[in-house]
Amino acid sequence: MTEFALILLSAVLVNNYVLTKFLGICPFLGVSGKVETAIGMSFAVMFVMTLASTASWLIQQLILVPLDMVYMQTVFFILIIAGLVQFVEMVMHKTSPVLYQGLGIFLPLITTNCAVLGVAILNVQQDYSFFASVLYGFGAAVGFAIVLVLFSGLRERIEGAPIPEVFKGSPITLITAGMMALAFMGFAGLVKV
Amino acid sequence: MHILLSLSVFSGFALLVGIGLAFASRYFHVEGDPLADKIDALLPQTQCGQCGYPGCRPYANAVAALEVDVNHCVPGGERTMLQIADMMGVEPKAIEAEETAPVVAFIREDECIGCTLCIKACPVDCIIGAPKQYHTIITDHCTGCTLCLEPCPVDCIDMLEVPETLEKWAWPVPGTERAKVGVERKHQHEGIDV
């Protein structure tokens, strides 16, 4: 039980995908303009990441290792991620058209979100059990979601703040992201690996 | 040999994913544009064409496709505009058309030839009458869209301002001309008192 708690904690805070591993920066900067879309994106990524890590573990253990085809890992994982993203897109178009329009191009771009592929590959590298790998994928997604929502909240406030002209737009966004990464480094001492 | 095996395994897997997606797309098929449906539900359905589109549905489609701003529905007024802007997540914009005094159509019955053309044009079915009979307008339901003026061959339809009677009176919408007039009158009145 402690092991699972540690996996979750480490994936969410200590080894945060966005701010510690610097994966998934594209949606982190692209969809964080508004809290609402950020929340929607978080849920979409959460769904895709958890399923992707589950599916990639299954593929790894049931297909790739028995058939001695581990070198095909990346291609297989990309295929399953692309399929999952397509699926999420269909579901979202049907159930919440406003969110679908709000996310726009960033929804299909989850396919090429390096955080999703990263979670699949790092997951199988760490030789987790099935449950642990599902938890790891979910934890990584929760970490991504927390950071994305916090960051979009910051950006909404910065929008109205008196920022010097030269820092407006992308510069202040990147500076804020850097400061958040510094803050998240504080979690490094939380768990001794 | 091994290469062939891995190729076939990969192709088979890709095929499976493809079949799964094909079924999913059948199951989650979306008829039309769900966003346009939602906008259409917010519009007043007077089909008056004052937005420049031939009806509420085409306007809803255009708004959903981001081709046009949210502020062109005159009968819906500010409330509808705010609802649509809120749903689309865009900034609200003031209605462009001038806020005019509410008008209703009125048929001069002794000139009406009973051609029923205005009845067909009315989007809210508030004109009653039959062929070769006088038509008249149920003023309570008239939205003042002026669509019946065009088809009338004898030009016997007028747009009249709604008279302010005791039965019809309502508080003016804040910020309109009518409200300003009221405030001015109040100030005048107080000025005389002092």
Image (cartoon, coloured by chain):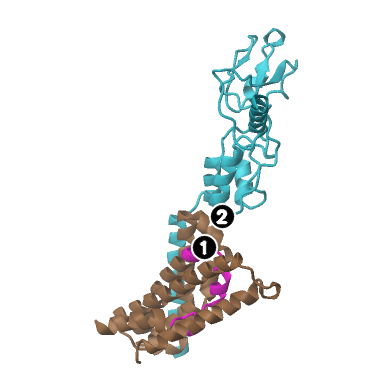
Chain colours: A brown, B cyan
Residue type indicated by callout 2: Gly
Residue type indicated by callout 1: Thr
Which residue is painted at 33% across and 77% down in the image? A135
State if disc 2 and disc 1 touch (CB < 8 Å): yes
The chain letter under disc 1 is A
Which residue is painted at 62% across and 48% down in the image? B63
Q: Quadrant of residue A8?
A: bottom left
Residue B45: percent from left, percent from top: 57, 35
Relative side of B124 to B188, left or right: left
Question: Mark number for residue B89?
Answer: 2
* Mark 1 Cα-neighbour bin, 10 Å: few <14, some 14–19, many ≥20: many
Q: Which residue is label 1 attached to?
A: A37
Please, which residue is most extreme toward the left here?
Answer: A1
Residue B28: percent from left, percent from top: 45, 56
Magenta highlight on residue A29: yes
Quadrant, the N terminus of chain B: bottom left
Residue range corresponding to the magenta coloring: A16-40
Question: Mark number for residue B167?
Answer: none
